[in-house]
Image: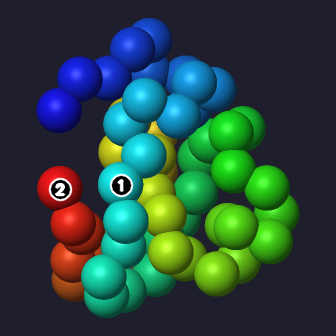
């Protein structure tokens, strides 16, 4: 998976979340998209809990 430049502004590393909640650190997704936890920008965001399943 390519990811540049690690700021969460371009959306290049966006993947779908299948299970779990995300701790968002991006400025790409809207507030409503962040609250739904359906996507994650893997360069700057992390799992809130121990388990996060994503679709690559």
Q: Is residue 8 left or right of residue 27?
A: left
Which residue is farthest top?
5
Q: Tell me the number on the disc at residue 4.
A: none
> Where is residue 17 drawn, in percent x and y?
36, 73
Spatial separation of the CA atoms under disc 1 and disc 2? 6 Å
Q: Tell me the number on the disc at residue 15.
A: 1
Taking 15 as reference, is 4 above or below it? above
Q: Tell me the number on the disc at residue 56.
A: 2
Q: Quadrant of the C terminus?
A: bottom left
Which residue is farthest bottom?
19
Task: Say which quarter of the image contains residue 54.
Answer: bottom left
Q: Residue at x 46, y 39 (%)?
A: 44
N-terminal-most mark, 1 or 2: 1
Q: Quadrant of the N terminus?
A: top left
Q: Is residue 34 left or right of residue 3?
A: right
> Where is residue 40 drawn, in percent x and y?
45, 57
Disc 1 crowd rating (10 Å Cα; few below 14, some 14-19, many 20+) is: some
């Amino acid at each position: 998976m390519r990811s540049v430049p690690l700021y969460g502004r371009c959306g290049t590393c966006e993947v779908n979340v299948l299970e779990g909640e995300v701790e968002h650190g991006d400025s790409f997704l809207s507030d409503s998209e962040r609250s739904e936890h359906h996507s994650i920008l893997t360069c700057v965001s992390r799992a809130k809990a121990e388990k996060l399943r994503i679709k690559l």
